[in-house]
Image: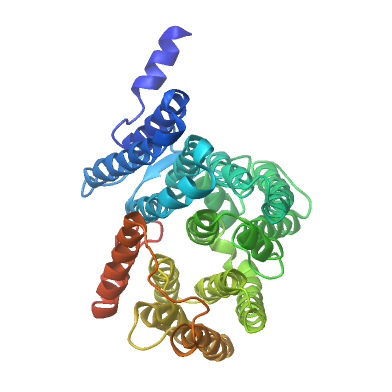
Amino acid sequence: MLAQTAFSLSSVNVHAVLPEIIITAALIIVLVVDLFLPDRAKSANAVISMAGVGGAAVALMSLIGTGTHRTFGGMFVLDGYAMLFKFLFLAVAAILIFMSVTYLNEVVRNIQGEFYFLLLTALLGMLVMPSARDLIALFIALETVTVPGFIIAGFKKHDNSSNEAAVKFFLFGVLSSAVMLFGMALIYGVTKSTNLYEIARVLSTKQYPMPIHHADSVVFASILLIIVGFGFKVSAVPFHFWAPDTYEGSPVPVAAFLSVASKAAGFAGLMQITFVAFGSHSSVWAPGFAILAALTMTVGNVIALQQKNIVRLLAYSSIAQAGYILIPLAVVANKSAAIQKEAFAAALTYILISMLFFLLSLAGMIPTAGFWAKFFVFRSAIGAGTLWLAAVMVANTLVGLYYYLSVGAKMYLREPKERGPIAVPYALVAAIVLMVIIVAAVTVYPDFFNHFSPRSTLVAF
């Protein structure tokens, strides 16, 4: 037994999982060091967390150009697709840590260690997510992202709205996990495999390991349940009800985490399921995504028009953004390989760009980064011939433009209730400057992100 264990451990590609190892070490250090820190020195946890994120980024950069790595029996794959998302998650984590420093010092000073521990735990799940090419690994990674969110959403323990946010997020999260797990169990029963590539092979050839009556119906039910489960994770309509209340009641850094990093992780998993495991059944899931995309864009933007609270407005805006990302997934049914590649590229580009959000960019104003993100998605819809979905997208973009500009008008044209300078923490200034630089860079050179998609090996380019 010991020899077998040593052999299995020696077969692990440590270099490929080095970013995950560094984040794991960082979260353990935070958990232990926090026990010995006085309340006035709790901010040291942020330094340790940032060092972990930086170390993981350096380890990830050392893997650039080294090809595709497979380990843990093929359950973990490090390729171009995984590296793109991992760099995104590390960048978002660094920004969130900058955002959190002052907020935690003012609101929950005595439990900062727990916050950074949970944030790094969620980051660990995010890093594993795009590399998980097995249903078991995918589910564990997704839950590693989600479960810490249940806790940090209710970090303001004496605030009823924060408690409500945590309870709603927990209930909907557990429900979505159960639905998704049921779908995964069904597809395992049909294919006798949890490996995404083996599932794709069995479904494309229909060479089932054992005779199953109405196998196509079981596969259809499995696809439906898994998509519904991911629909909750990315807050697509009609599975979005938890998002506005959860965002509003959560601490501000947590709301940013849920709307950006957590949602991007959900899309990373969804794209793997659809383009890899269920690629041969795109005619089944693509029409469903078309309906979900149209509903999500429309409902998110229309309800955002009625919001007076800026956090709830951005929550519904986040829902609408999910609809735009779903469009490329809706245009691949029965289309040529070129159309499928363009759709995948559009989805990947929109996820990379739309995670960097300012009002004009979110609205899609020419020539901001948000405009180019929407342009790539719009082009994929037109190229696939789904003109009605492209028209819905344009109409919703105009609706979104109205309420984004209305926020800007209130900021610049109305008299402030309080006059005088506002003290902005240096850490928050650093986060804002970093996002401004990235959005400005994409505005000037939009093809920068669009060139990333051919580097992904999830879909052959």
Q: Is residue 239 left or right of residue 434?
A: right
Percent of width and height locating residue 26: 38, 33
Q: Position of residue 16 (x, y in %)?
A: 32, 37
On the rendered structure, is 142 left or right of 64?
Answer: right
User: Residue 329 placed where, x, y %?
Assistant: 53, 70
Rendered image coloring scheme: rainbow
Examine the image and state in which quarter residue 391 appears: bottom right
In the picture, measured across the screen, residue 71 lies left or right of residue 119, that is left
Residue furthest to the top in view is 2
Q: Residue at x 39, y 21 (%)?
A: 9
| Foreground pick, 430 / 181 | 430
Identity of the residue drawn at 50% across and 44% down: 122
- Point out residue 305 in the picture as x, y percentages from the top left corner: 63, 84
Residue closest to the far right: 213
Quadrant assignment for the C terminus: bottom left
Q: In this figure, what is the number of numbered marks?
A: 0
Classify residue 147 by image quadrant: top right
Q: Is residue 272 visible?
A: no
In this view, the residue in front, 41 or 321, is 41
Q: Could you say which is closer to the camera, residue 232 or residue 161?
A: 161
Q: Residue at x 57, y 73 (%)?
A: 310
Report if residue 151 is visible in the image.
yes
